[in-house]
Amino acid sequence: MTRIDTIMRTSPVIPVLVIEDAAHARPIAEALVKGGLRVLEVTLRTEAALDVIREMKKVEGAIVGAGTVLNEQDLRRSIDAGAEFIVSPGLTESLGRAAIASGIPFLPGVANAGDIMRGLDMGLDRFKFFPAEASGGLKALKALAGPFGNVRFCPTGGITAETAPTYLAEEAVLCVGGSWLIGKGAPDVAAIEDMARKAASLA
Protein backbone atom coordinates (compact mmCIF):
# COMPACT_ATOMS: atom_id res chain seq x y z
CA MET A 1 0.00 0.00 0.00
CA THR A 2 1.42 3.38 -1.01
CA ARG A 3 1.61 6.30 1.40
CA ILE A 4 -1.03 8.28 -0.51
CA ASP A 5 -3.30 5.22 -0.46
CA THR A 6 -2.89 4.98 3.32
CA ILE A 7 -3.72 8.68 3.72
CA MET A 8 -6.83 8.35 1.53
CA ARG A 9 -8.05 5.41 3.61
CA THR A 10 -7.55 7.21 6.94
CA SER A 11 -10.79 9.22 6.79
CA PRO A 12 -13.81 8.99 4.48
CA VAL A 13 -13.88 12.77 4.09
CA ILE A 14 -10.87 15.05 3.62
CA PRO A 15 -11.83 18.60 4.63
CA VAL A 16 -10.82 21.09 1.94
CA LEU A 17 -9.88 24.17 3.95
CA VAL A 18 -9.71 27.78 2.78
CA ILE A 19 -8.52 29.69 5.85
CA GLU A 20 -7.84 33.43 5.84
CA ASP A 21 -6.46 33.80 9.38
CA ALA A 22 -3.70 31.57 10.74
CA ALA A 23 -5.02 32.21 14.25
CA HIS A 24 -8.01 30.02 13.36
CA ALA A 25 -5.85 27.12 12.21
CA ARG A 26 -5.30 25.21 15.43
CA PRO A 27 -8.88 25.47 16.78
CA ILE A 28 -10.21 24.22 13.43
CA ALA A 29 -7.71 21.36 13.22
CA GLU A 30 -8.35 20.35 16.84
CA ALA A 31 -12.11 20.27 16.25
CA LEU A 32 -11.78 18.23 13.04
CA VAL A 33 -9.38 15.71 14.59
CA LYS A 34 -11.53 15.42 17.72
CA GLY A 35 -14.50 14.72 15.46
CA GLY A 36 -12.60 11.93 13.73
CA LEU A 37 -11.20 13.57 10.59
CA ARG A 38 -7.40 13.48 10.78
CA VAL A 39 -6.48 14.22 7.16
CA LEU A 40 -6.67 17.95 6.44
CA GLU A 41 -6.10 19.67 3.09
CA VAL A 42 -5.11 23.32 3.41
CA THR A 43 -5.58 25.03 0.06
CA LEU A 44 -3.01 27.57 -1.09
CA ARG A 45 -5.77 30.05 -1.90
CA THR A 46 -4.97 32.52 0.87
CA GLU A 47 -1.89 34.43 1.96
CA ALA A 48 -2.12 32.68 5.34
CA ALA A 49 -2.10 29.14 3.91
CA LEU A 50 1.52 28.22 4.62
CA ASP A 51 1.27 29.55 8.19
CA VAL A 52 -1.98 27.59 8.56
CA ILE A 53 -0.14 24.40 7.59
CA ARG A 54 2.58 25.14 10.15
CA GLU A 55 0.01 25.73 12.90
CA MET A 56 -2.12 22.69 12.09
CA LYS A 57 0.98 20.51 12.13
CA LYS A 58 1.19 21.21 15.86
CA VAL A 59 -2.12 19.42 16.48
CA GLU A 60 -1.60 15.86 17.66
CA GLY A 61 -3.06 13.32 15.27
CA ALA A 62 -3.48 15.71 12.34
CA ILE A 63 -2.13 14.73 8.91
CA VAL A 64 -1.80 18.06 7.13
CA GLY A 65 -1.38 18.49 3.40
CA ALA A 66 -1.36 21.33 0.89
CA GLY A 67 -3.98 21.69 -1.80
CA THR A 68 -4.30 23.90 -4.88
CA VAL A 69 -0.63 23.21 -5.60
CA LEU A 70 -0.16 24.47 -9.16
CA ASN A 71 3.57 24.35 -9.89
CA GLU A 72 7.02 23.43 -8.59
CA GLN A 73 7.31 26.63 -6.56
CA ASP A 74 4.06 25.84 -4.73
CA LEU A 75 5.35 22.32 -4.16
CA ARG A 76 8.62 23.51 -2.61
CA ARG A 77 6.91 26.10 -0.43
CA SER A 78 4.40 23.53 0.81
CA ILE A 79 7.06 20.97 1.67
CA ASP A 80 9.11 23.64 3.45
CA ALA A 81 6.01 24.54 5.51
CA GLY A 82 5.70 20.90 6.60
CA ALA A 83 2.98 19.57 4.32
CA GLU A 84 2.73 15.79 4.56
CA PHE A 85 0.96 15.30 1.23
CA ILE A 86 0.25 17.35 -1.88
CA VAL A 87 -3.02 17.81 -3.79
CA SER A 88 -3.25 19.56 -7.15
CA PRO A 89 -6.33 20.47 -9.23
CA GLY A 90 -4.73 19.01 -12.35
CA LEU A 91 -1.65 17.13 -13.54
CA THR A 92 1.20 18.60 -15.54
CA GLU A 93 4.41 16.84 -16.51
CA SER A 94 6.61 19.30 -14.61
CA LEU A 95 4.62 19.24 -11.36
CA GLY A 96 4.10 15.49 -11.52
CA ARG A 97 7.78 14.73 -12.02
CA ALA A 98 8.83 17.17 -9.29
CA ALA A 99 6.33 15.76 -6.78
CA ILE A 100 7.40 12.18 -7.51
CA ALA A 101 11.08 13.12 -7.22
CA SER A 102 10.43 14.76 -3.83
CA GLY A 103 8.98 11.54 -2.45
CA ILE A 104 5.95 13.27 -0.91
CA PRO A 105 2.55 11.55 -1.25
CA PHE A 106 0.87 13.16 -4.25
CA LEU A 107 -2.81 13.31 -5.24
CA PRO A 108 -3.17 15.05 -8.61
CA GLY A 109 -6.48 16.10 -10.09
CA VAL A 110 -7.92 14.35 -13.14
CA ALA A 111 -11.13 14.91 -15.08
CA ASN A 112 -10.88 12.54 -18.05
CA ALA A 113 -9.22 9.39 -19.40
CA GLY A 114 -6.28 11.31 -20.89
CA ASP A 115 -5.45 12.81 -17.50
CA ILE A 116 -5.52 9.36 -15.90
CA MET A 117 -3.34 7.84 -18.62
CA ARG A 118 -0.80 10.65 -18.18
CA GLY A 119 -0.69 9.89 -14.47
CA LEU A 120 -0.36 6.15 -15.04
CA ASP A 121 2.59 6.82 -17.33
CA MET A 122 4.25 8.54 -14.35
CA GLY A 123 3.54 5.59 -12.07
CA LEU A 124 0.55 7.20 -10.32
CA ASP A 125 -2.74 5.42 -9.69
CA ARG A 126 -4.42 7.51 -6.98
CA PHE A 127 -6.18 10.67 -8.15
CA LYS A 128 -8.49 13.49 -7.15
CA PHE A 129 -11.50 13.48 -9.51
CA PHE A 130 -12.00 17.21 -9.93
CA PRO A 131 -14.26 19.11 -10.31
CA ALA A 132 -16.43 16.10 -9.56
CA GLU A 133 -19.95 17.41 -10.01
CA ALA A 134 -19.10 19.75 -12.88
CA SER A 135 -17.29 16.89 -14.65
CA GLY A 136 -20.34 14.64 -14.66
CA GLY A 137 -20.54 13.46 -11.08
CA LEU A 138 -20.78 9.84 -10.04
CA LYS A 139 -21.97 8.72 -13.49
CA ALA A 140 -18.79 10.08 -15.10
CA LEU A 141 -16.59 8.65 -12.36
CA LYS A 142 -18.06 5.18 -12.82
CA ALA A 143 -17.48 5.40 -16.56
CA LEU A 144 -13.84 6.38 -16.00
CA ALA A 145 -13.29 3.70 -13.37
CA GLY A 146 -14.31 0.95 -15.82
CA PRO A 147 -11.17 0.91 -18.02
CA PHE A 148 -8.83 1.67 -15.11
CA GLY A 149 -9.45 -1.15 -12.67
CA ASN A 150 -6.55 -0.43 -10.31
CA VAL A 151 -7.14 3.32 -10.08
CA ARG A 152 -8.79 4.82 -7.00
CA PHE A 153 -10.24 8.29 -6.56
CA CYS A 154 -10.99 11.09 -4.13
CA PRO A 155 -13.85 12.99 -5.81
CA THR A 156 -13.80 16.68 -4.88
CA GLY A 157 -15.82 19.66 -6.03
CA GLY A 158 -19.52 20.23 -5.41
CA ILE A 159 -19.88 17.24 -3.08
CA THR A 160 -22.11 17.77 -0.04
CA ALA A 161 -22.85 15.94 3.18
CA GLU A 162 -25.95 14.57 1.44
CA THR A 163 -24.22 13.30 -1.71
CA ALA A 164 -20.99 12.05 -0.11
CA PRO A 165 -22.43 8.64 0.89
CA THR A 166 -23.35 7.78 -2.71
CA TYR A 167 -19.80 8.52 -3.84
CA LEU A 168 -18.27 6.56 -0.96
CA ALA A 169 -20.38 3.53 -1.86
CA GLU A 170 -18.54 3.28 -5.19
CA GLU A 171 -15.70 0.72 -5.14
CA ALA A 172 -13.27 3.04 -6.95
CA VAL A 173 -13.72 5.79 -4.34
CA LEU A 174 -11.54 5.74 -1.23
CA CYS A 175 -12.60 9.11 0.18
CA VAL A 176 -14.17 12.40 -0.86
CA GLY A 177 -13.00 15.99 -0.50
CA GLY A 178 -15.45 18.22 1.33
CA SER A 179 -15.64 21.97 1.78
CA TRP A 180 -18.92 21.94 3.69
CA LEU A 181 -17.36 21.39 7.13
CA ILE A 182 -15.99 24.88 7.71
CA GLY A 183 -17.85 28.17 7.44
CA LYS A 184 -16.28 31.57 6.90
CA GLY A 185 -15.09 33.82 9.71
CA ALA A 186 -14.26 32.84 13.28
CA PRO A 187 -14.63 29.07 13.68
CA ASP A 188 -17.53 27.57 15.60
CA VAL A 189 -15.51 24.68 16.98
CA ALA A 190 -18.51 22.84 18.45
CA ALA A 191 -20.29 22.90 15.09
CA ILE A 192 -17.12 21.86 13.25
CA GLU A 193 -16.56 18.94 15.60
CA ASP A 194 -20.18 17.84 15.19
CA MET A 195 -19.98 17.96 11.39
CA ALA A 196 -16.65 16.16 11.46
CA ARG A 197 -18.13 13.39 13.61
CA LYS A 198 -21.00 12.96 11.15
CA ALA A 199 -18.60 12.91 8.21
CA ALA A 200 -16.31 10.40 9.91
CA SER A 201 -19.28 8.10 10.49
CA LEU A 202 -19.69 7.72 6.71
CA ALA A 203 -16.78 5.27 6.66
Image: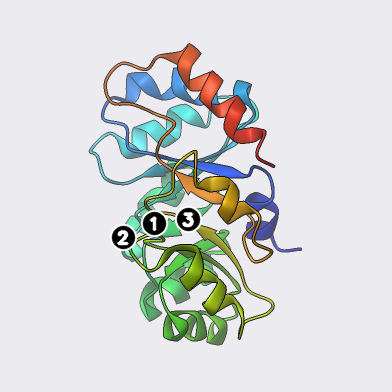
Question: What's the residue at 53%, 43% (across, down)?
Answer: 14
Nearer to us of marks 1 and 3 is: 3
Crowding near the residue tagged with mark 2, few <14, some 14–19, many ≥20 C-alpha atoms within 10 Å: few
Question: What's the residue at 65%, 39% (across, down)?
Answer: 202
Residue 104: image x %, image y %? 56, 59
Residue 137: image x %, image y %? 44, 63
Which SS class for mark 2?
Answer: helix
Nearer to us of marks 3 and 2 is: 3
What amino acid type should be assigned to the residue bearing mark 2?
Gln
What amino acid type should be assigned to the residue bearing mark 3?
Ile
| Residue nearer the viewer, 27 or 144 | 144
Q: Is residue 32 above or below residue 18?
A: above
Label drawn at residue 73? 2
Residue 132: image x %, image y %? 41, 61
What amino acid type should be assigned to the residue bearing mark 1?
Arg
Q: Which residue is mark 1?
A: 76
- From the image, which quarter does the N terminus lie in? bottom right
Q: Residue furthest right?
A: 1
Q: Which residue is mark 3?
A: 86
Which SS class for mark 3?
Answer: strand
**Pointer 3 with pointer 2, Cβ within 8 A:** no
Residue 46: image x %, image y %? 24, 39
Which SS class for mark 1?
Answer: helix
Crowding near the residue tagged with mark 3, few <14, some 14–19, many ≥20 C-alpha atoms within 10 Å: many
Q: Earlier in the sequence, mark 1 or mark 3?
A: 1
Q: Earlier in the sequence, mark 3 or mark 2?
A: 2
